[in-house]
């Protein structure tokens, strides 16, 4: 007679916690839908005070094809970061999306915060005329500008702006026991190697009913940079 043995992982928190983390990361992949072939990377995440932020830079051009039918932000030097805000508390949380930054290390003494682009700024950055920098091959890399100049706004601009808006984070309010996800955009001017030192900094979150501020999130994205 074969004896069946049953194990209860919840009796050992040291074992259960890593399992829950792995399950949550896998669940995030399922919520976002099956990723394109060649882009199977787990999102980086940080969790505290009943709130979790996960982030995954899209560094494979194939990842953009579903959301962007013609012109890809990645081809225009802009990286999209897929973020998910999960609220496990009873109180709704407001995330100040405009304060989110991508921090990158330009050199040993120069760390810079890159602001996120809204859909109009993204279309301007991707479709603006490209001017070759004659100093690009000489001397240190120039700092990334905090804003983008406007290009010609035609039907191609409108199409790209609409696609970017539809794929972006839809709301800044995360209701209790729910998840909000979408894309944030950062103009790296094709300097995607900067992702090897990048962090996503989410500094301003507030519980709406209690008025209590949550501790900031600083998510290490370095393992997702081009190798």
Image (cartoon, rainbow, N blue to C red):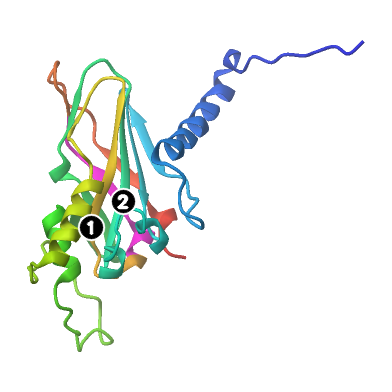
Residue marked by disc 1: 186
Q: Is residue 195 magenta?
A: yes
Residue 119 sits above or below residue 144 on the image:
above
Residue 125 circle label: none
Can see residue 116?
no
SS state under label 2? strand
* Camera-side residue of 215 and 130: 130
The answer to whether the residues at label 1 and label 2 have Cβ atoms under 8 Å apart is yes
Q: Is residue 94 magenta?
A: no
Q: Residue at x 88, y 13 (%)?
A: 2
Q: Residue 158, percent across and down?
A: 13, 60
* Camera-side residue of 38 and 194: 38
Residue 136 sits above or below residue 3 on the image:
below
Residue range corresponding to the magenta coloring: 194-205
- Count residues near mark 1 (Cα–Cα under 10 Å), then give few for <14, some for 14-19, many for 20+: many
Q: Residue at x 8, y 71 (%)?
A: 152
Residue marked by disc 2: 81
Q: Residue 163, percent across and down?
A: 22, 53
Q: Would residue 226 appear left or right of 169 to someone viewing this image? A: right
Q: Would residue 62 appear left or right of 141 to someone viewing this image? A: right
Residue 88 sits above or below residue 43 on the image:
above
Q: Residue at x 52, y 34 (%)?
A: 22
Position of the N terminus by quadrant: top right
Q: CA distance from mark 1 to mark 2?
A: 8 Å
Q: Residue 187, percent across and down?
A: 22, 62
């Amino acid at each position: 007679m074969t004896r069946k043995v049953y194990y209860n992982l919840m009796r050992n928190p040291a074992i259960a916690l890593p399992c829950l983390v792995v399950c949550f990361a896998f669940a995030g992949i399922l919520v976002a839908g099956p990723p394109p072939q060649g882009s199977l990377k787990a999102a980086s995440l940080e969790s505290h005070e009943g709130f979790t932020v996960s982030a995954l830079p899209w560094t494979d051009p194939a990842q953009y094809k579903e959301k962007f039918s013609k012109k890809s932000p990645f081809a225009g030097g802009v990286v999209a970061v897929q973020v998910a805000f999960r609220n496990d508390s009873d109180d709704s949380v407001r995330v100040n999306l405009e304060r989110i930054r991508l921090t990158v290390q330009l050199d040993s003494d120069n760390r810079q915060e890159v602001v996120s682009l809204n859909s109009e700024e993204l279309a301007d950055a991707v479709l603006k005329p490209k001017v070759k920098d004659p100093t690009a091959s000489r001397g240190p890399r120039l700092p990334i500008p905090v804003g983008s100049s406007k290009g010609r706004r035609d039907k191609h601009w409108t199409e790209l702006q609409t696609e970017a808006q539809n794929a972006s984070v839809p709301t800044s309010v995360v209701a209790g026991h729910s998840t909000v996800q979408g894309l944030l955009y950062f103009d790296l001017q094709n300097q995607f190697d900067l992702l090897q030192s990048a962090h996503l900094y989410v500094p301003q979150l507030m519980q709406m009913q209690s008025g209590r501020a949550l501790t900031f999130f600083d998510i290490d994205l370095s393992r997702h940079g081009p190798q």
